[in-house]
């Protein structure tokens, strides 16, 4: 026990027991796999950059960085910034996917040196997400499709305008235009993410982009489309698929279940911790 730990009062320790438990598991993982481990469980938007910086501002660039990532998605531009920031702070960058890392989460995964997955892990289409309400994401493609469908129905039956105006009350013209613009840029984001891994050359980036464009951009009909470890390996991604009985995965899963049970937005490392409710606004 450190001197700081020893000075904590009983009530303070009781109030933060779950956080200490998670930190102990993070430290256990770091000792076992000789790395720095950080955790992000949140949507991916511009505010994520500052919260990520809190976790890695003092990172040693000669030490490997592992990121335990769980996210339904978010902003692809921010995802590319996260990869570049992480890659600049470590020897090699590994992303661990215990559950879902969709959309912007998948973009982050694509820029890693190594990807750790198991039977529960799922990546998904690179489909930009918009936060129309706190804690709730909507797919750019779904926004565009809903607006286009409403326009056609109103044109055919003008009397339905009040109904569709009510149903789409959270969608502005600016949001629709942003959805169209971000969707048009998905191919560029895919390439930028792959190129952010400094161990890849231009030929490798081009080959991976060609293999991944179909399953991650062109083919999926739904944001929920599954892209698991086997699909990722078949596409040529550097996936390490662990059995559920593997000691590394068991430690990962033990830690992940703490965040799943907490069910809040979390940015955490052995020395930093930000826990926010899903409805809590951020500064940006």
Image: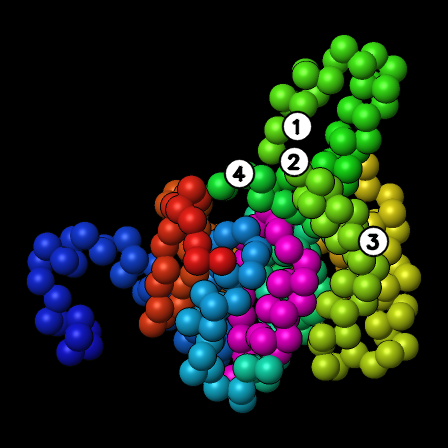
| Residue wearing tag 4 | 133
Q: Is residue 52 one of those drawn in magenta?
A: no
Residue count near mark 2 (Cα–Cα under 10 Å), binned few <14, some 14–19, many ≥20 = some
Q: Is residue 268 visible?
A: yes
Tell me the element at label 2: loop
* Residue 196 pos. (x, y %): 72, 75
Residue lying at 29% horizontally and 57% vertically, measured from the top left: 19
Mark found first going from the N terminus, 3 or 1: 1
Disc 3, SS:
helix
Task: Give the mark toward the camera: 1 or 4.
Answer: 1
Residue closer to the observer: 119 or 181: 181
Residue ID for mark 2: 171
First-in-chain label (1 vs 4):
4
- Residue drawn where x is 75% and y is 53% of the image: 182
Report if the CB atoms under discs 4 and 3 are less than 8 Å apart: no
Quadrant in the rendering for residue 186:
bottom right
Using a 10 Å C-alpha cutoff, classify the residue at mark 1 as few (fewer than 14 neighbours), some (14 to 19) or many (20 or more): few
| x then y, percent, for residue 116 | 62, 62
């Amino acid at each position: 026990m450190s001197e700081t730990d020893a000075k904590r009062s009983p009530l303070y320790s009781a109030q933060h027991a779950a956080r200490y438990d998670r930190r102990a598991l993070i430290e256990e993982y770091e000792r076992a796999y000789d790395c720095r481990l950080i955790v992000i469980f949140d949507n991916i938007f511009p505010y994520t950059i500052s919260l990520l910086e809190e976790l890695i501002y003092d990172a040693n660039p000669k030490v490997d960085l592992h990121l335990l990532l769980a996210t339904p998605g978010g902003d692809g531009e921010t995802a590319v910034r996260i990869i570049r920031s992480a890659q600049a702070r470590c020897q090699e960058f590994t992303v661990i996917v215990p559950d879902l890392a969709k959309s912007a989460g998948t973009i982050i995964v694509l820029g890693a040196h190594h990807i750790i997955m198991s039977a529960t892990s799922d990546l998904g289409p690179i489909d930009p997400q918009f936060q129309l309400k706190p804690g709730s994401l909507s797919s750019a493609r779904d926004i565009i499709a809903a607006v286009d469908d409403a326009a056609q129905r109103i044109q055919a039956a003008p009397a339905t305008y009040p109904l569709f105006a009510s149903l789409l009350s959270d969608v502005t013209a600016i949001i629709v235009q942003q959805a169209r613009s971000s969707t048009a840029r998905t191919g560029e984001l895919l390439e930028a993410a792959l190129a952010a891994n400094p161990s890849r050359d231009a030929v490798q980036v081009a080959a991976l982009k060609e293999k991944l464009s179909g399953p991650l951009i062109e083919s999926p009909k739904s944001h929920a489309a599954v892209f698991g470890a086997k699909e990722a390996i078949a596409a040529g991604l550097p996936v390490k698929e662990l059995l559920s009985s593997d000691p590394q995965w068991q430690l990962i899963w033990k830690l992940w279940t703490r965040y799943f049970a907490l069910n809040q937005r979390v940015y955490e490392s052995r020395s930093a911790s930000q826990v926010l409710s899903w409805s809590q606004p951020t500064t940006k």
